[in-house]
Image (tube, helix red, strand yellow):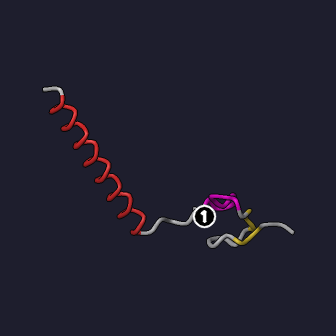
Amino acid sequence: MSNLYPCPECNHSVAASATSCPNCGANLEEEQGIVFYIVKIIITIAVILVLGRVIMYVSESLR
């Protein structure tokens, strides 16, 4: 039993683990949705806020 499926672009057989079609080069990876990018931005902002607070705490404790 092989893990092959047809490429959505050229219908060539492609391995299930492939990231692109060896025949036409079509990208076979699923694209991330908008929710992924929103979560990524929220996490980045949270990290920046935490780092800023730590820097403020350290600078005030050195006085």
Q: Quadrant of residue 24?
A: bottom right
Q: Nearer the viewer, residue 55 or 19?
A: 55
Q: Which segment is the magenta one?
A: 17-25
Q: Is residue 47 above or below residue 60?
A: below
Instruction: Name which residue type carries label 1.
Output: Leu
Q: Quadrant of residue 54?
A: top left
Q: Is residue 11 above or below residue 41?
A: below
Kindly identify the residue that appears in the image at 63 percent across and 73 percent down. Answer: 8
Would you say residue 19 sits in the magenta stretch?
Answer: yes
Residue 46 on image: x %, y %: 30, 53
Residue extending farthest to the right is: 1
Q: Is residue 58 above or below residue 40?
A: above
- Viewed as shown, does residue 20 lie left or right of 45? right
- Viewed as shown, does residue 52 lie left or right of 13? left
Would you say residue 28 sits in the magenta stretch?
Answer: no
Q: Nearer the viewer, residue 18 or 37?
A: 37
Residue 50 on image: x %, y %: 28, 46
Kindly identify the residue that appears in the image at 62 percent across and 59 percent down. Answer: 25
Residue 13 on image: x %, y %: 75, 67
Q: Quadrant of residue 7?
A: bottom right
State which quarter of the image contains the N terminus: bottom right
Kindly identify the residue that appears in the image at 20 percent across and 37 percent down. Answer: 57
Kindly identify the residue that appears in the image at 35 percent across and 55 percent down. Answer: 43
Label 1 sits on a secondary structure element that is: loop
State which quarter of the image contains the C terminus: top left
Q: Residues within 10 Å of mark 1 (few under 14, many from 20)?
A: some
The main secondary structure of the magenta stretch is loop
Residue 34 on image: x %, y %: 39, 69
Which residue is the site of mark 1? 28
Q: Nearer the viewer, residue 55 or 43?
A: 55
